[in-house]
Image (tube, rainbow, N blue to C red):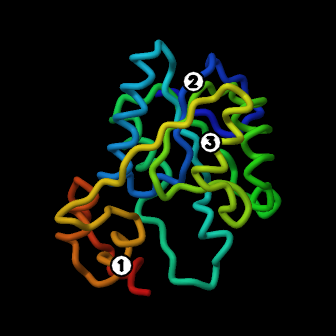
Amino acid sequence: MQVYRGLDVSIQLSRPVAAVGSFDGVHLGHCQILRYLVAYAREHSMQSLVVTFDPHPQQLLRPESDFFAINSLERNLELIGAQGVDATVVIPFTEEFSKLSYTEFVKRYLIDGLHVGALVMGPNHAMGHNRAGSHDLLKQLCAQYGIEVVEIPELTLREVGVHSSKIRRAIREGDAARASEWLGYPYIIDKEKNNG
């Protein structure tokens, strides 16, 4: 998998299909999206692209909270690559970037910067300042540029949706077994790091 850091580098992709998100932990729900991303790319003779951020947006936007990253960026990139994704772009998440509207983000980064041809996303995904870009609004915006938006259903285990926030809660509570089940791989709890 090719990894590009920022959009100031030469990115050799031609109208890829993209998934955008933090992908922290690269849990089973993320993997379902990534598998569909790769399958869609193959079916349509496109390249598969993940667009992610460093640091995690919550680390910048809520520094006073007990938020913590499940994995390092490098570990998340390894897990994304293991799903067969062609390339990942890591966008530096800054205060200035956090103020971009979803329309600015889509136009500047996805269309002008990466020439994205399709977007794959989960049902609860939103983009832009204050998460204003809902699935429906993104679909309307992307339609203006000929970009298909494909929604992937939420992954549930025993009728519970798999989310990074739930995995963090399990880690905080010391429940490595539950965290590992949702992640899809063994998680070792670092009690000193995750005692908040």
Three-letter code for the amino acid on which mark 3 is drawn: Lys
Q: Of circles 3 and 2, which is in front? A: 3
The reply to whether callout 1 and callout 3 are in contact (CB within 8 Å) is no
**Residue 25 as seen in the image, left or right of residue 52:** left
Kindly identify the residue that appears in the image at 22 percent across and 72 percent down: 176
Callout 2 crowding tier (Cα within 10 Å): few <14, some 14–19, many ≥20: many
Q: Identify residue for label 2.
A: 16
- For marks 1 and 2, the one nearer the N-term is 2
- What percent of the width, then of the height, locates residue 122? 45, 50
Please give the label number shown on residue 29.
none
For the residues labelled 1 and 3, the Cα–Cα distance comes to 32 Å
Snapshot quadrant of residue 159: bottom left
- What percent of the width, then of the height, locates residue 21? 54, 50
Q: Nearer the viewer, residue 85 or 120?
A: 120
Q: Identify residue for label 3.
A: 139
Snapshot quadrant of residue 77: top left
- For marks 1 and 3, the one nearer the N-term is 3
